[in-house]
Amino acid sequence: QVQLVESGGGLVQPGGSLRLSCAASGSIGEIGTIGWHRQAPGKDRELVTSITAGGRTNYADSVKGRFTISRDKAKNTVYLQLNSLEPEDTAVYYCNARIWRARWDTYWGQGTQVSVSS
């Protein structure tokens, strides 16, 4: 069994920062691309950023220059540094990962709430 567990969400004022973590555990053969998605109330889930096994990253235009994704392969953990947060960043943030066990499958975490408000 594989689990992805997000943490680090919370309430922050506009302009503030948060650091989210996504830790993978269980019977894992290999981890491929890991992504962070978010879903705001009444909106579709959207891809925020992703990082490949080789470290290549991509970002949604709305977060470029403010968010940074990184990964610690030894800990099977991916981080998302959120800076200069705006009220529009309020959402539940989910991580997902392509993981090899006997085949490649996509796994999702349960989500962590990020709220930006004064």
Image: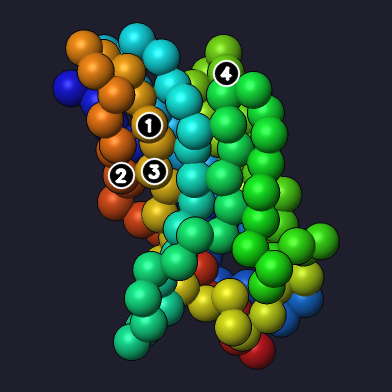
* 90 relative position to 28: left or right: right
Q: Residues within 10 Å of mark 1 (few under 14, many from 20)?
A: some
Of pointers 2 and 4, the one earlier in the residue sequence: 4
**Disc 2 from disc 1: Cα separation:** 9 Å
Residue 83 appears in the rendering: no
In what quadrant of the picture does the C terminus appear?
Answer: bottom right
Q: Label 3 is placed on what type of residue?
A: Asn
* Label of residue 73 in the image: 4
Based on the displayed image, in which of its 4 quarters is residue 17 positioned? bottom right
Contact check, label 2 and label 3, Cβ < 8 Å: yes
Residue 54 appears in the rendering: yes
The percent coordinates of residue 23 (x first, y second) are 44, 32
Of pointers 3 and 4, the one earlier in the residue sequence: 4
Q: Label 4 is placed on what type of residue?
A: Lys
Residue lying at 68% horizontally and 34% vertically, measured from the top left: 56
Q: Label 2 is placed on what type of residue?
A: Trp
Q: Label 1 is placed on what type of residue?
A: Arg
The percent coordinates of residue 116 (x first, y second) are 59, 79
Contact check, label 1 and label 4, Cβ < 8 Å: no
Residue lying at 71% horizontally and 57% vertically, measured from the top left: 67
In what quadrant of the picture does the N terminus appear?
Answer: top left
Residue lying at 44% horizontally and 22% vertically, measured from the top left: 31
For disc 1, the marked residue is 98
Q: Residues within 10 Å of mark 4 (few under 14, many from 20)?
A: few
Based on the displayed image, in which of its 4 quarters is residue 82 positioned? bottom right
Q: Secondary structure at mark 1?
A: strand
Of pointers 2 and 1, the one earlier in the residue sequence: 1
* Label of residue 108 in the image: 2
Label count reads 4
Contact check, label 1 and label 3, Cβ < 8 Å: yes
For disc 3, the marked residue is 96
**Disc 2 from disc 4: Cα separation:** 18 Å
